[in-house]
Amino acid sequence: RLAAGRMRLELEGVPLADAARDLSAEFAAVALRLEHPLDVVVEQDGVAFADRERVIQIGRALIDNAFLHTPEGTPVRIVVRGPVLAVEDDGPGISPEDSEQVFARFTRLPGSRASGTGLGLAIARELAELMGGELRLSSEPGRTVFSLELPAAVGEVEPAPILV
């Protein structure tokens, strides 16, 4: 649907702390099974002007990747910093030369344990951009952060459906 330009977005005020808690609840059983401590940290509450379902979809992709690419027992955090929803882990990190490649379609890094199509992060980045935001990566050994940076909602926001 993204490639065909037939996706409908419902842009509205999305409380990111609520989205983070919903994601945590959705992944609680998986986190327990995979022995990944999963926490929500609200550093600064924020409301983004975004499509709630797409924010959740991006969050799912980021949490899935954190669970898949970090050793068992690695803590994962869903962090809210104003209009930013981040997924952080204390895993091995992503090398600088691979940091842009992780967003390319059909890409799986050498030595990864992934078995998917290699589309998750590419789609997540495209969705972020459609909502006027960005998906950024910051990584070093022992810490990886994927940050979904969205426009802040200002005042009362009426839902605005758009077709992209």
Image (cartoon, rainbow, N blue to C red):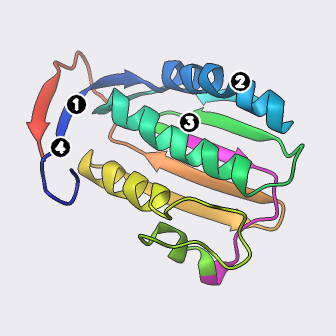
- The residue segment tinted magenta is 85-97
- Which of pointers 4 and 1 indicates the residue nearer the eye? 4
Q: Is residue 17 above or below residue 87?
A: above
Q: Is residue 27 magenta?
A: no
Whether residue 94 is in magenta: the answer is yes
Real-space Cα separation, disc 3 to disc 2, in angstroms:
22 Å
Looking at the rendered structure, which numbered label has been put on residue 11? Answer: 1
Q: Alpha-carbon distance for marks 2 and 1? A: 28 Å
Q: Earlier in the sequence, mark 1 or mark 3?
A: 1
**Residue nearest the observer in this picture, 150 or 97:** 97
Q: How far separated are the C-alphas under marks 1 and 3? A: 20 Å
* Dot 2 amino acid type: Ala
Q: CA distance from mark 4 to mark 3?
A: 28 Å
Q: Does residue 87 appear in the picture of this structure?
A: yes
Residue ID for mark 2: 28
- In the image, residue 146 above or below residue 36: below
Of the residues tagged 3 and 2, which is closer to the observer?
2
**Which residue is found at the position 58% from the left and 72% from the top?**
108
Q: Nearer the viewer, mark 4 or mark 3?
A: 4
Q: Are marks 2 and 4 in contact (CB under 8 Å)?
A: no
Residue 83 visible in the displayed image: no
Provide the residue designation for mark 4: 7
Q: Type of residue at label 4? A: Met
Give how far across and how far down residue 111 sits, in percent. 74, 76
Q: Position of residue 98 (x, y in %)?
A: 61, 78
